[in-house]
Image (cartoon, rainbow, N blue to C red):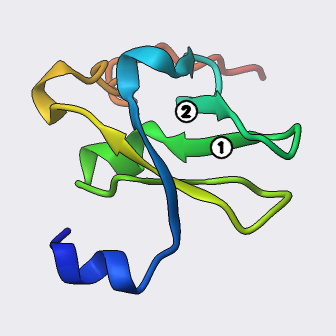
Amino acid sequence: MSASDDQEYSIYDEVEIEDMTYDAALQSYSYPCPCGDRFEIALADLQDGQDIAVCPSCSLMVRVIFEVDNLPKAPDAAAAPIAVSA
C-alpha cells in the first residue's frame, strides 16, 4: 500500500501487531476501538499483504504494522485429520 492509498482511507492510527490480540480459533487479530468494539483483521488478509484493520461498528480503521515472515503459519488443511462417520 502506498502513501497515495492513505488518501482513500481515513486511518485513525497505526498499531504494531504485537499490541493486537490473536485469536487462533478465528485466525484473526483484534485491537480495542475507541467506540467500544474492536478493530479486526484476518490472518489470511495480513498474509496477502493487506494492512488495514476495520471496526465493524464505526468508520474507524487502523494500519497494522507487521512483517509477513513473523505471522503465525496458517493451518495446513490437507494435513489436518478429517472426522468421517458412516
Measured from the top left, where is residue 44 in percent x and y?
A: 39, 45
Q: Which mark is residue 54?
A: none
| Kind of residue at badge 2 | Ser
Q: Which mark is residue 39?
A: 1
> Which residue occupies 37% across, 42% down?
64
Q: Position of 20 compared to 5: left or right?
A: right
Kind of element beneath mark 2: strand
> Are there few (<14), some (14-19), or many (20+) residues within 10 Å of tag 2?
some
Q: Earlier in the sequence, mark 2 or mark 1?
A: 2
Q: Position of 55 compared to 49: left or right?
A: right
Quarter occupied by the N terminus:
bottom left
What is the count of numbered marks? 2
Q: Position of 11 compared to 71: left or right?
A: right
> Which residue occupies 88% across, 37% down?
36
The answer to whether residue 84 is above or below residue 35 is above
> Are there few (<14), some (14-19), or many (20+) residues within 10 Å of tag 1?
many
Judging depth in this view, the residue of 9 and 75 nearest the camera is 9
Quarter occupied by the C terminus:
top right
State how far apart marks 2 and 1 are (Cα). 10 Å
| Kind of residue at badge 1 | Phe
Q: Which residue is mark 2?
A: 28
The answer to whether residue 73 is above or below residue 62 is above
Judging depth in this view, the residue of 48 and 51 nearest the camera is 51
Measured from the top left, where is residue 50 in percent x and y?
A: 32, 57
The answer to whether residue 43 is above or below residue 62 is above
Q: Quadrant of residue 22?
A: top right
Discs 2/1, front:
1
> Which residue occupies 27% across, 21% down?
73
Measured from the top left, where is residue 23 in percent x and y?
A: 60, 19
Measured from the top left, where is residue 2 in percent x and y?
A: 15, 72
Q: From this viewpoint, which residue is outermost toward the left?
A: 69
> Which residue occupies 21% across, 83% down?
4
